Amino acid sequence: MNAAGRLLNRDVLSPNWVLAVFLTRTQLSFAVFLFLVFMSAFSVVYMTNLARDLQANLHQSQAENAQLFSQQGQLLLERSTLSMQARVQQVAEQKLNMLIPDHQSVVKIHE
């Protein structure tokens, strides 16, 4: 058997002995407290960064929403302009060379 095994068999290197030699109860509690303080500080930094990212995304989404709302209004105005009777008649006369027929050339058919 090697030396470490003989020491474990004699309870010289028991877990309680290792803790007693290297860490006292106050040192262990201080180490745990220090670890918790560091974890708390890191979590504050992480949450602050996350909140800033979410705030930036919110402002970007609101700006995009305002732009899309403005574009929707322009498109609705353009649609209403294009569907007006005068506009339809103007396009028919200019692009399609259509004319409004005279009263004499209009024939009414009754069934």
Image (spheres, helix red, strand yellow):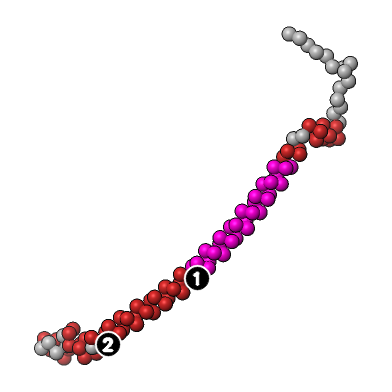
* Residue at the image position 46 percent from the left and 74 percent from the top: 45
Of callouts 1 and 2, the N-terminal one: 2
Residue sitting nearer the eye, 110 or 94: 110
In the figure, is residue 45 to the left or right of 8?
right
Q: Which residue is mark 2?
A: 27
Local SS, label 1: helix
Residue at position x 34%, y 80% in the image? 35
Is residue 106 among the parts visible in the rendering? yes
Q: Is residue 7 left or right of residue 92?
A: left
The chief SS type of the magenta part is helix
Instruction: Specify few, some or many for label 2: CA neighbours under 10 Å numbering under 14, 14-19, or 20 or more.
Output: few
Residue underneath mark 1: 49
Q: Which residues are magenta?
A: 49-78
Q: Residue at x 86, y 27 (%)?
A: 99
The C terminus - image quarter: top right
Three-letter amino acid code at disc 1? Asn
- Count up the numbered dots: 2
State whether residue 81 is above or below residue 28.
Answer: above
Going by the numbered disc 2, the residue's amino acid type is Gln
Left or right, residue 4 beside residue 37: left
